[in-house]
Image (cartoon, rainbow, N blue to C red):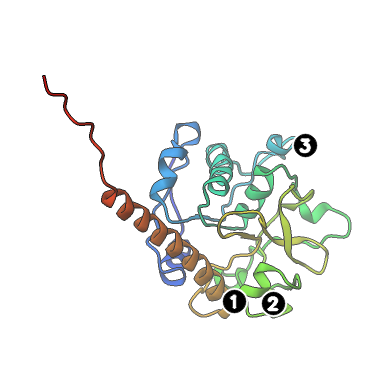
Amino acid sequence: MATAHSVGDKYVAAVLDGAGGLPLLIPALGGRLAVDALLPRLDGVFLTGSPSNLDPALYGGPPRPYGDPADCDRDATTLPLIRACLVEGVPLLAVCRGIQEMNVALGGTLYGRLHEVTGRDDHRSDKTLAYEGRYGPRHPVHLRPGGLLRSILGGVEEIEVNSLHGQGIDRLAPGLEVEATAPDGTIEAVSVPSAKAFALAVQWHPEWRVAEIVQHRLLFAAFGAACRQRLDARAAHERQSRQRPVHRRPRSVA
């Protein structure tokens, strides 16, 4: 089977309809991607979910279980991309695999099989259900008082979310702050308080029915607003650069 770079339609629709942006796919090129040259051209970065899991070697975890889906090219692309976004102040929204990538990129670890951890629930989707059933509400999450996510979602204490992940955050990375937790203690959302711009990640899939579910719509609207703020700042900088006078040294006269 030939390798392909792809993105699900629900992610495209969420950026277009929820954030009001034009989605452009960043190919998983690993070390061949010139991140420093790419970021000045972007208004924001959205890290999607994926059937694949992060390589446990990246966070000192046990060997990958047999049959566990992998995408090492994505690993090699997203981890440096996340760190660069935070340094350069590029708005960042991450979902599902994306929250795990953010945690590992900043020095945290993961549970490779969350359902096998004592005291934790099974957060995987029921694959016997139809597609829409798998993305239906599964459990509540409690939002941290005074947190960024709680503010974005209008101050509510709790929301119902879907759940389609087999991995989860174990040790929280330095610099991350917990924004939401599931009833079993699983970290469901994090932010980066020191970030220069919007930087938020959630474990569920808010791209699902973004136009119909108010919390999903509010989250993508906040991301879109941050992206437009960066766009405006870039445009203002370009105008100033064009208007800046050029000082030329006078010619010497013989």
Identify the residue at image location x=37%, y=53%. Answer: 237
| Residue 62 badge | 3
Crowding at label 3, few (<14), some or many (≥20) Cα neighbours within 10 Å?
few
Of 63 and 216, nearer the camera is: 216
Q: Which mark is residue 106?
A: none
Q: Which residue, given by chain and number where applicable, does mark 2 sit on?
A: 159
Q: Is residue 17 above or below residue 110?
A: below
Residue visible at 79% across and 56% down? Answer: 115
Mark sitting on residue 215: 1
Position of residue 183 measured from the top left corner of the image (x, y, whole percent) = 81, 69
For residue 199, side relative to residue 36 (left or right):
right
Q: Secondary structure at mark 2?
A: strand
- Residue 34 lies in quadrant: top left
Q: Residue furthest front?
A: 254
Between the residue at mark 3 and the residue at mark 1, the CA separation in whole angstroms equals 36 Å
Residue 39 visible to an observer of this rendering: yes
Q: Are marks 1 and 2 in contact (CB under 8 Å)?
A: yes
